[in-house]
Each structure stands twice: as C-alpha cells, then as structure tokens.
C-alpha cells in the first residue's frame, strides 16, 4: 500500500495526468455517456453477486438436505464473505469514501468542475459524501481475486491472472467516466489485498481443523430440526 501511495504523494499531478487521458474540454470524460462502460459496470456487479452466492448457497442446500455433503468448506465461505464485508464494505465504502472528502475527477476545477483537487491521503472538505477516495467499485472488482486463494493449486495462477484482468477492466471504466483518480483505484486494490492476506491467515489457515466438520454437523442438525418443525405444522388429513 505504501509503494502504491508514495508516487502519488510525491507527484500529485500523476493523478491529473492519468485522468486527462480520458477528458476532452468539448465533451468531458469519454466514458460518461458510454453504454459499453455502463454494461461493464453491470457485469462487474453481477460477477461479484455470483461469487457470493456460489459460496453461500451450499449452506442453504445443507440446511434443506441435511444428509447431503457440504460442497464448499465453511471456512471458504467465511473467508470470501468476510473479505467482502470488511474490505469493500466497511473500510472502503463505510469509512474512507464517506469521511475523506476527496472530490471526484469530474468535479474538480481542472476538468470543468467547481471543487479543488486534493492529493491522495489528504483529508479534505471538497466532497461531502460518497467521495472519490477510495474507489468502491475498484475495491469490489478486486474482491474477485479472492478466488485465487480458494481454488485448487493447479488453477491458482490462471485464476489470479483472470481475476486481475477483470479488476483492471472494470476499474478502467471508473477512470474513463471521471469517477475516480488512478490512485483511488490502486489504493483500493491494496486495501482489499491486505484484508485478503489477513483473513487468509486468520480463517483459511488459522481456524482449527475441526471447524469445517463442526459447522457441517451443526447445519445438518439444524436442517433436521427444521424439517421436523415444518412437518409438525402440516395439517392432519381428514379421515374418510
């Protein structure tokens, strides 16, 4: 994170230069009216939701069918959901974007707006809420890199390359729209990466070996109890 931040702290104009690549005085930011960029954002959100469902739905399946085998390890589900909740959710969207006050590129004087440009990591009042620092969509897009931590070892390199490309393409749209500076995106990636590494140690590696079997057994018991409770609610058939 320090390595990503330092160039933009030493040379704040790097952010303006990167955003200027997508800006024209006559028409504004090139991606602001692009239907392809909007579609890209929608695809990015859909992929993130799909990943969350893929790791969470097996728990519901186990509840519905207690005798079935749990297809995803509970620690994997916890790792993925905790990474998303703490990284993009708590740190990025709930804290930094709400309280750091950095105006978005499209809102600063250099690109036709009225707000002052603020260098990275500088607290500001140029923006009131839902501000530029850091990128929420960049963080959410980078969240898919969590897959590289949980797939079989033979798939990890290809998964890492594919998910990094996905994060880069989705984040490119935010640059083209004037929604974020380059530093907003790269630092949001670094934040989520730190969260992933921490939860890998605490959850994927650190939880005891019996955690997964314990959760699976608890889900099976809860599923059987739920089935008994539902069967008790069925009305008795009238006798003929």
Image (cartoon, rainbow, N blue to C red):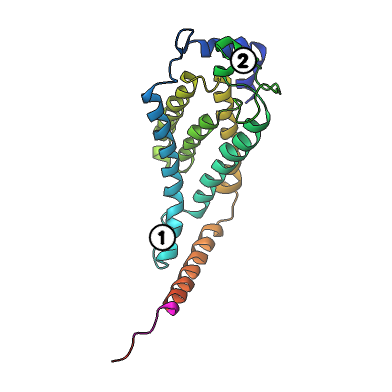
Residue 223 rendering spot, x and y as whole percentages:
46, 68
> How far apart are the alpha carbons under marks 1 and 2?
53 Å
Residue at image x 51%, y 29%?
138
Whichever of labels 1 and 2 marks the residue nearer the N terminus, that label is 1
Residue 224: horizontal and vertical position, in percent? 45, 72
Tell me what residue is drawn at x 42 percent, y 67 percent: 66
Position of the C terminus by quadrant: bottom left
Per the rendering, the mark at residue 238 is: none
Q: Nearer the viewer, mark 1 or mark 2?
A: 2
The magenta stretch is 232-237
Query: Horizontally, is 143 left or right of 134 in the view?
Result: left
80 above or below 33?
below
Name the foreground residue: 144 vs 113: 113
Taking the view exactly as shown, the residue that stands out farthest to the left is 240
Q: Main secondary structure of the magenta part?
A: loop
- Number of numbered markers: 2
Q: Nearer the viewer, residue 115 or 174?
A: 115
Residue 48, image x, y percentages: 45, 39
Q: Is residue 49 magenta?
A: no
Residue tagged 2: 114
Q: Is residue 94 left or right of residue 162?
A: right
Residue at screen point 37% across, 25% down? 35
Q: Which residue is mark 1?
A: 61
């Amino acid at each position: 994170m320090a390595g990503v931040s330092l160039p933009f702290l030493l040379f704040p104009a790097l952010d303006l230069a990167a955003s200027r690549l997508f800006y024209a005085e006559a028409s504004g930011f090139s991606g602001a009216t692009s239907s392809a960029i909007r579609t890209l954002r929608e695809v990015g959100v859909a992929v993130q939701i799909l990943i969350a469902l893929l790791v969470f739905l097996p728990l519901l399946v186990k509840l519905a069918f207690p005798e079935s085998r749990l297809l995803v390890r509970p620690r994997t589900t916890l790792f993925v959901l905790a990474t998303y909740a703490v990284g993009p959710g708590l740190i990025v969207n709930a804290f930094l974007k709400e309280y750091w006050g950095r105006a978005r590129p499209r809102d600063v004087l250099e690109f036709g707006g009225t707000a002052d440009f603020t260098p990275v990591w500088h607290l500001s009042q140029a923006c009131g809420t839902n501000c530029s620092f850091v990128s929420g969509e960049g963080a959410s897009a980078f969240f898919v890199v969590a897959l590289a931590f949980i797939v079989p070892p033979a798939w990890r390199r290809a998964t890492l390359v594919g998910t990094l490309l996905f994060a880069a393409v989705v984040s490119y749209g935010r640059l083209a729209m004037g929604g974020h500076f380059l530093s907003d995106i790269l630092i949001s990636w670094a934040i989520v990466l730190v969260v992933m590494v921490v939860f890998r140690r605490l959850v994927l590696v650190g939880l005891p070996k019996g955690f997964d079997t314990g959760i699976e057994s608890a889900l099976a018991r809860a599923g059987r109890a739920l089935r008994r409770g539902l069967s008790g609610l069925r009305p008795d058939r009238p006798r003929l």
